[in-house]
Image (spheres, rainbow, N blue to C red):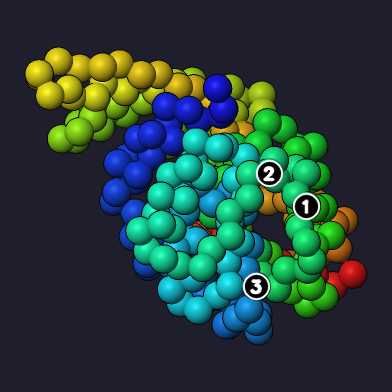
Amino acid sequence: MGAYHSFSYFYDILTQNISYKHMAEYFDSLIKMHGGRKNLLLDLACGTGSLSEEMSRIGYDVIGVDGSEEMLNEAIEKKLDSGLNIQYLCQDMTRLDMFGTIDVTICALDSLNHLPDLDAVRRTVERVSLFCEPEGLFLFDVNTPHKHKNVLGNNTFVYDMDQVYCVWQNTYREKDDRVEMCLDFFERQQDGSYKRYEDSFSEIAFDESVIDDILVNSGFEIAEKYEYDTVMPPKPDSEKLVYVARKVR
């Protein structure tokens, strides 16, 4: 059974409040602002392919990579419906292996936070750098330690929707700014009963200086950092940051 087995099944339901069209337009605006080429784009940790679809509609030649076969199965179903020319690959992003170089890489929805430790983040950034065109861009968002401690923390969230009832319970570990997440899903059946599923995973957050060092040591320069979904600089209480990095060596 692959990672995010139950989560992948309910992912699109739980994230139906996200406008992937808006997200794609936001990333496209940052790519244009920083001189990126509208050519070959890698959607790293693409999940169920919603952002890949929107980036393809904007005009990018998209490759989507994810480590979860279950997530990619959902993405391929969307591709069959939309008819968009997107290539999907099942790969661990710490072992990313492309056929050639990539003009722009995007890693959205705090996917780097889902990696198990700092070494995994470092190896992922190094692989992105290896396959990045000279002067190519790497854009990604990350949850901050502030969000992990003060927003996600030791909190429980409940999602009550027509198809599914979800209880999301978090446990915060201060020593490494890690949040352990346990999810229980209850899917309504035709006879009115509920079928229960469960899944669990964790997210880890890092100080900006740590991420900055990884990028620079991997051959990137930091073109800019933004408060998520804006072009404003980060604040001390920012919950999510967006990095724009450029390959320089």
What residue is pinned by disc 3? 40
Q: Earlier in the sequence, mark 3 or mark 2?
A: 3
Going 38% across and 34% down the picture, which residue do you hit? 9
Q: Front-most of 236 and 12?
A: 12
Left or right: where 227 falls relative to 159 = right
State yes or no: discs 3 and 2 in contact (Cβ < 8 Å). Answer: no
Residue located 30% across and 41% down the image: 13
> Which residue bears the numbered disc 1?
97
Does residue 193 sit above or below 145 in this rendering?
Answer: above
How packed mark 1 is, by other alpha carbons closer than 10 Å (few <14, some 14-19, many 20 or more), is some
Q: Quadrant of the N terminus?
A: top right
> How much space separates mark 2 and mark 1, taking CA atoms?
8 Å
Which residue position is annotated with label 2? 91
Q: Are marks 1 and 3 in contact (CB under 8 Å)?
A: no
Residue 44, located in which quarter of the rendered image? bottom right
Is 164 on the left-hand or right-hand side of 52?
left
Please provide percent x and percent y for residue 26: 46, 71
User: Image point 12% across, 24% down: which residue?
Assistant: 190
Separation of disc 3 and disc 2 at Cα?
A: 18 Å
- Dot 1 or dot 3, earlier in sequence: 3
Q: Look at label 1 and name its amino acid.
A: Asp
